[in-house]
Image: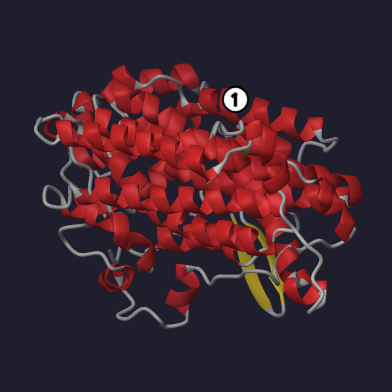
Amino acid sequence: MSLLKREEWQHLVRDVDWTLSYVDDEAVYPEWMSGTGKVPREAWSSWEEDYKVAYPEYVATQREKESAAYAVKAALQRSTAWDDLSEGWKSSTKMHFGGVTLVESEAVLAELKMARFGLNGSWRNMAAFGALDEIRHAQITLFFGHEFVGKDPQYDWTQKMFHTNDWVAVSLRNLFDGMMVTSNVVDIAIQLPLTFETGFTNLQFVALSADALESGDVNFANMISSIQTDEARHAQQGGPTLEILVEHDPVRAQWVIDKAFWGSARAFAALTGPAMDYYTPIEHRKQSYREFMEEWIIDQFVRTIEDYGLKKPWFWDEFMKGLDTWHHALHMGLWYWRPTLWWKPTAAVSKDDRDWLRSKYPNWEKVFGDKWDVIIDNVNRGDMEATLPETLPWLCSMCHLPCCNATFGYDGKWRVRDHSLTHNGVKYHFCTAGCRQIWWKDRDNLNHPTVIDRFLAGEIQPMDVGGILGYMGLTPDTMGDDPDYSWAADYKDRLIVPRVPVAGS
């Protein structure tokens, strides 16, 4: 007996649904989970994905991907490729393994919520495949990262990082808990598949894959490329969801996209920006972080929202200006507070590095050069204590990243500004106007205390750097440090002004 072609039967089974007779629809799809809001219940019947797949096809495709990924890994285990990688590039992989692995596991929960509370049978079916995808992503990343634990204990943070109170972990939990866990499924579909996976994962999976190949890390490139091939399928849940929401509640649609885009942009400025513009050796950099953002994120994002009749976010000018400063400032902050990290952040400010940075960011020298000059002088003088922190960085109450964003003032000077507000007698500090506005409008949804808040509340003991590092779960063998200070040697011929002791110091 011949089998029917998929297109001859799938339209009958992909949207299996029925009217419940034994319980109210609201009891099965409560508003606080389904999030239909102003959208009529019957409007969700028009939800339809572009790329359709049946389970046998899904299994066959995934089997091929798994076989290919693990075959490459097995072959490379017998080589010395990892030993030949630069320490800067290894730091990029440590950032990825620690910062992304358990986010994939959290995404399983988001997909399962949509598979249970999505208001259309096709949507729930697609989300079930999405949950399988995310399980695979978490497992393959854990497995690949585990291989290197015996060579470098910092790779243990692949599975450990999100279970610590490291300030980077708190920042990412704050972002992804709000995006995947505390939101209803309509907001999840727009924040996660549409805004985050359709756009920002390109930075981490496409850009880093290209840099990985250039750096000789075929294993890492193979792993993240295998993951990215899944994203295109389950990321399409966002499009039809947004289309229906825009028709009935465009104000809500705009807000959900805006806050997800902003939070993602802040996180990737810390995770991907330094990896692309500093940790990857110059000869292996395919594009600058800004160039990649303009090509893969900005153009695509603007086209997407305009296609749905939405506007550019209200923070657009601040975001565009931040492309020239955010990740550079965060890189400097990460380097300075390197003992609080689980990777080794190379400064990458040799003369050649600075020439490259100036060619990509014309204002880099004016904004950051003199600060690095002070650090370089301290290194060449052997005064390493002056390059290490004495307390925690000033953290933003919204994104939980250091408040270190330089902005250009009317007086022609670059300054880091405090964007603060007082609420219920408490003063909150923010790194940007965008973070302040989003926190204010969404303040009752998710509000993690920063590590600074915990420190001032006495939760960290003893109240010194040692107590801070212990609270974050860092041990001497996992604390970050620059793997190679040779970049400072480029400037040994420069006149170094002796450090003048300050009275009482």
Indicate the position of residue 252 as horizontal and vertical percent values. 82, 54
Q: Seen in the image, is 231 located left or right of residue 432?
A: left
Residue at the spot of label 1: 294
- Image: 161 above or below 141: below
- Asked which secondary structure carries label 1, the reply is helix
Quadrant that contains the N terminus: top right
| Picture quadrant where residue 279 is located | top left
Instruction: Tell me what residue is drawn at x 24 percent, y 42 percent.
Output: 378
Q: Residues within 10 Å of mark 1 (few under 14, many from 20)?
A: some
Q: Position of residue 176 (x, y in %)?
A: 54, 58
Residue 122 located left or right of residue 80: right
Q: Residue at x 55, y 63 (%)?
A: 177
On the image, the x and y values in percent for residue 64 come to 36, 33
Provide residue 373's location: percent of width, then percent of height. Answer: 33, 34
Would residue 417 be visible to someone looking at this image? Answer: no
| Residue at the farthest front position | 1
Q: Answer above or below: position of 355 versus 175.
A: above
Amino acid at the residue labelled 1: Glu
Say which quadrant the C terminus sits in.
bottom left
Q: 83 or 349: nearer the eye?
A: 83
Q: Quadrant of residue 84?
A: top left
Tell whether 137 sits left or right of 197: left
Tell me if I can see residue 116 in this picture: yes
Which colouring convention does the figure follow?
secondary structure
